[in-house]
C-alpha cells in the first residue's frame, strides 16, 4: 500500500499526487513502484476531493483498471479531530470514484475506507452506517447499482488499543451486525506504529504491535473469520524501522502482516536497488502466521510495556518544549491543512505529529528510539535477569535498532539544546550502550557538521533537509 506520508525530503504537491499514483501502480519491471494499493489521504491534508476520481481516469488512459489491477483506499479524516463536512465530503469522494470507475470499466475502485485514530467499536459502526447511507443516495441519484460493499478499516494508533485489539474487533463485528445489519467474514485492520511511539515510546509500541498481531491471529482462528492486518511503519526505528538495511530483521519481527505501507521516504529516499530488494522481501513474507508464543507471557509483557511507557514519558518531559519549537520550522513535504487539533497531547505535554517529532529529535542530536530506554533498562536490570531476557527474546531487533540510532546521536548538540537537563539523557545513553553491549558507529563528520548548524533561525529547514538526506528520511 503506497501512502502519501510527508516523511521524505522530496516535496510532492497535491497536484502532483495523481501522476505519483500512476508511478506507484506501475510494475517494477516498467520502472514503477509495483504497489497493489494507493492510500489517498485526507487526514490533515489538502487533498482534492476529486483526487480518487482523477486517479481512476488517468489510470484508465494508461490501461490500468482501478478495482482490478489496483485498489484506491481512502483515509478519511476522523470527524472528532476535523470537521464533519470534511469527513462526509471524503466519504463521498470515495463513493463517486466508484461511480466513475463503474462507468468506465464496470469495476469499483474503492473497496475500503480507513478511519484514523479509531477509539472504540462504535466509531467503526457509525462510519460504516454513513458510508452505506451515502452509497444508497449516490446510487439513487446517479442511476448505478453498486456490486460490492465499501468496508471500514479501523486504524488503531495507540498502545492501549493494540493490546485490546481482539476485544475491539469482537465488539465491532457484533455491533455491525446488530445495529446496521452489516455482516463480514473478513476484516482488514490497520495497526499504526508512529502515534503509538509518540505517546508511549519505541519499546512499548513495538511490544504492543507484536501482541496485536498475535491476538488478531488467535481471535480469527477462534471465531472462524479471516483477518488481514495492515502495518503502518516508516524508515526510522521509532516509526518501525521498515528500511532496506533492516528488512531481514523486520520480516521476522512483525510476522503476521498481510499489507504493509510503502511510505514516501522508502520510495524517494532509497536507492532503486535497495527499494526492489525490500519490496521483494515484503511480498515473500506477507501473510505468514505470527508466533503466538508471545501470548504465553502476556502478563509479563504487559508489565514491560507499562514500565517502558513510564520511562519514556519521564524523559519526554525534558525535551518536549524544545522539540515543539523546532517542529514549527520543520519543512512540509506534503500540502497540509492547518488544524489546531492536529497537534498531539500526552497528558499536559503538547507534541507535534510523529514525523515532525522524529525530525526534531534527530535535529537536537538525540534519536527518538533512545528516549527513556536507558531508564527502562536500569530499572529492569535491578530486578531479576528474567525481565531483560524476556525483552530481548520478545524484541530481538532492539539491539539493531539502537545501533542504528547511535550513528545519529550527537551529545554536543544535545547539550546545546537541553543545557543541564541533557546530562540525564546522556547518562541514559551510556547505560543503554553498557547494558546492551552496543557496538557504536560514530556519526560521520559531514552529518555532525550539518546538525551542529541547526538553530532556530531561517536556515533551520535547509539544514534539517540536508541531515535528513544523509539518514534517508525526514522523520
Image (cartoon, helix red, strand yellow):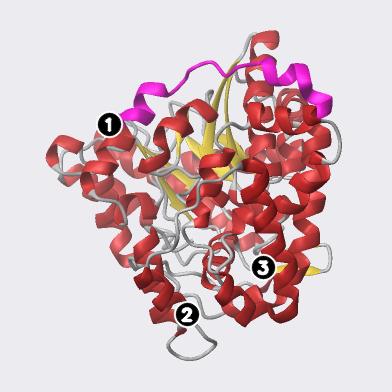
Q: Nearer the viewer, mark 1 or mark 3?
A: 3
Distance between mark 2 and mark 1 Cα atoms: 48 Å
Q: Nearer the viewer, mark 3 or mark 2?
A: 2
Which of the pair 198/191 is nearer the observer?
198
Q: Which label's residue is closer to the chain start, 1 or 3?
A: 1
Quarter residue 325 falls in: bottom right
**Residue 137 in picture, x, y percent from top left:** 54, 43
* SS under mark 2: helix
Distance between mark 3 and mark 2 Cα atoms: 27 Å
Task: Identify the residue at horizontal 65%, vertical 63% (top origin).
Answer: 82
Whether 287 is among the magenta residues is yes
Q: Which residues are magenta?
A: 280-301
Q: Which label's residue is closer to the chain start, 3 or 2?
A: 3
Task: Identify the residue at horizontal 40%, vertical 66% (top origin).
Answer: 468
**Residue 339 in picture, x, y percent from top left:** 62, 72
Whether 112 is among the magenta residues is no
Q: Which residue is mark 3?
A: 343
- Classify 10 Å Cα crowding around label 1: few (below 14), some (14-19), many (20 and above): some
Rendered view: 394 above or below 90: above
**Residue 231 in picture, x, y percent from top left:** 53, 37
On the question of residue 470 being in view, the answer is yes
Residue at far right of view: 383
Task: Identify the residue at horizontal 85%, vertical 41% (top origin).
Answer: 382
Distance between mark 1 and mark 3 Cα atoms: 37 Å
Q: Which residue is mark 1?
A: 69
Q: Which residue is mark 2?
A: 452
Circle 3/circle 2 CB separation < 8 Å: no
Quarter residue 174 falls in: top right
Amino acid at each position: 500500500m503506497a501512502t502519501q506520508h510527508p516523511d521524505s525530503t522530496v516535496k510532492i504537491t497535491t497536484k502532483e499526487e495523481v501522476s505519483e499514483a500512476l508511478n506507484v501502480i506501475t510494475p517494477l519491471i516498467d520502472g514503477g513502484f509495483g504497489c497493489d494499493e494507493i492510500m489517498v489521504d485526507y487526514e490533515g491534508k489538502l487533498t482534492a476531493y476529486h483526487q480518487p476520481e482523477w486517479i481512476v481516469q488517468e489510470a484508465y488512459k494508461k490501461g490500468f483498471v482501478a478495482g482490478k489491477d489496483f485498489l484506491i483506499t481512502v483515509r478519511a479524516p476522523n470527524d472528532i479531530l476535523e470537521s464533519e463536512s470534511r469527513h462526509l465530503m471524503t466519504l463521498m469522494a470515495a463513493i463517486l470514484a466508484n461511480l466513475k470507475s463503474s462507468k468506465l470499466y464496470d469495476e469499483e475502485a474503492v473497496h475500503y475506507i480507513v478511519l484514523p485514530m479509531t477509539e472504540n467499536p462504535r466509531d467503526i459502526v457509525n462510519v460504516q452506517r454513513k458510508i452505506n447511507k451515502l452509497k444508497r443516495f449516490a446510487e439513487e441519484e446517479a442511476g448505478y447499482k453498486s456490486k460490492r460493499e465499501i468496508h471500514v478499516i479501523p486504524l488503531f494508533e495507540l498502545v492501549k488499543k493494540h493490546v485490546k485489539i481482539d476485544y475491539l474487533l469482537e465488539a465491532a463485528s457484533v455491533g455491525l451486525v446488530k445495529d446496521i445489519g452489516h455482516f463480514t467474514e473478513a476484516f482488514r485492520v490497520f495497526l499504526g506504529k508512529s502515534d503509538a511511539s509518540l505517546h508511549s515510546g519505541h519499546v512499548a509500541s513495538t511490544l504492543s504491535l507484536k501482541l496485536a498481531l498475535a491476538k488478531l491471529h488467535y481471535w480469527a482462528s477462534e471465531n472462524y473469520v479471516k483477518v488481514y492486518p495492515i502495518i503502518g511503519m516508516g524508515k526510522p526505528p521509532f516509526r518501525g524501522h521498515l528500511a532496506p538495511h533492516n528488512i531481514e530483521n523486520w520480516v521476522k519481527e512483525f510476522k503476521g502482516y498481510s499489507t504493509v505501507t510503502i511510505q514516501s521516504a522508502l520510495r524517494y529516499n532509497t536507492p532503486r536497488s535497495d527499494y526492489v530488494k525490500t519490496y521483494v522481501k515484503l511480498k515473500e513474507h506477507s501473510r505468514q502466521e505470527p508466533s503466538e508464543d508471545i501470548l504465553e507471557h502476556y502478563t509479563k509483557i504487559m508489565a514491560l510495556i507499562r514500565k517502558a511507557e513510564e520511562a519514556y514519558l519521564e524523559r519526554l518531559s525534558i525535551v518536549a518544549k524544545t522539540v515543539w519549537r523546532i517542529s514549527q520550522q520543520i519543512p512540509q513535504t506534503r500540502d497540509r491543512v492547518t488544524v489546531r487539533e492536529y497537534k498531539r497531547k500526552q497528558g499536559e505535554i503538547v507534541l507535534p505529529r510523529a514525523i515532525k517529532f522524529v525530525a526534531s529529535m534527530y535535529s537536537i542530536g538525540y534519536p527518538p528510539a533512545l528516549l527513556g530506554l536507558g531508564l527502562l533498562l536500569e530499572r529492569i536490570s535491578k530486578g531479576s535477569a528474567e525481565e531483560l531476557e524476556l525483552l530481548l527474546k520478545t524484541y530481538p531487533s532492539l539491539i539493531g535498532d539502537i545501533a542504528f540510532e547511535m550513528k545519529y546521536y550527537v551529545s554536543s548538540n544535545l547539550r546545546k539544546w537541553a543545557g543541564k537537563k541533557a546530562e540525564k539523557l546522556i547518562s541514559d545513553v551510556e547505560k543503554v550502550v553498557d547494558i546492551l553491549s552496543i557496538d557504536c558507529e560514530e556519526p560521520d563528520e559531514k552529518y555532525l557538521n550539518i546538525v551542529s548548524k541547526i538553530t532556530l533561525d531561517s536556515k533551520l529547514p535547509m539544514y534539517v533537509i540536508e541531515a535528513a538526506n544523509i539518514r534517508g528520511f525526514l522523520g
